[in-house]
Image: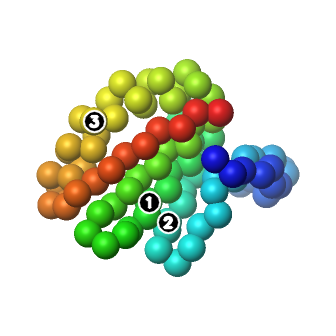
Amino acid sequence: MVSSTRSAPSASGDVVAYRAGPAIDGETLTLRASTGPLAGLIVQAEWRGQRLTVRLFAPDNVMAARLGRDLRQMEATLGAALGMEIVMEVRGD
């Protein structure tokens, strides 16, 4: 994973550092959870042809392991809900 550290203002106005995921293009949506139990998780969805690839970039290996345990179930559930092929990946720090 190619990543870099960037700074951004938080909701309170404080500047916080975060690790960015890989570079994105016009076919990619990237979201980052900033609070709660998933804080630091980056979710990247990329549409290519008839497939949606969802990458979960966990801020630590503990969260990555937790997400990895249910990865295939999440893939099947999302695929059934959207009626398309879904590929999910989990990457830890």
> Where residue 16 appears, x then y in whole percent?
81, 47
Q: In the image, what residue type sits under mark 3?
A: Arg
Q: In the image, what residue type sits under mark 2?
A: Leu
Q: In the image, what residue type sits under mark 1?
A: Ala
Q: Are marks 2 and 1 in contact (CB under 8 Å)?
A: yes
Callout 3 crowding tier (Cα within 10 Å): few <14, some 14–19, many ≥20: some
Q: Secondary structure at mark 1?
A: strand
- Would you place residue 7 above or below residue 25 in this image? above
Q: Secondary structure at mark 2?
A: strand
Q: Which residue is mark 3?
A: 72
Q: How is the image coloured?
A: rainbow
The C terminus - image quarter: top right
Measure the alpha-carbon separation of dots 2 and 1: 5 Å
Q: Which residue is mark 2?
A: 29
| Residue located at (37% from left, 46% from top) | 88
Callout 2 crowding tier (Cα within 10 Å): few <14, some 14–19, many ≥20: few
| Residue located at (56% from left, 43% from top) | 57
| Residue located at (64% from left, 47% from top) | 1
| Residue located at (33% from left, 50% from top) | 87
Measure the alpha-carbon separation of dots 1 and 3: 16 Å
Between circles 3 and 2, the one closer to the viewer is 3
> Where residue 34 appears, x then y in whole percent?
62, 46
User: Counting residues from the N terminus, which is met first, the one under dot 2 or under dot 1?
Assistant: 2
Is there any visible trace of residue 84 in the rendered image? yes
The quadrant in which residue 8 appears is: bottom right
68 vs 50, left or right, is: right
In the image, which disc is placed on residue 45?
Answer: 1
- Would you place residue 71 above or below residue 54 in this image? above
Report the front residue among 52 and 59. 52
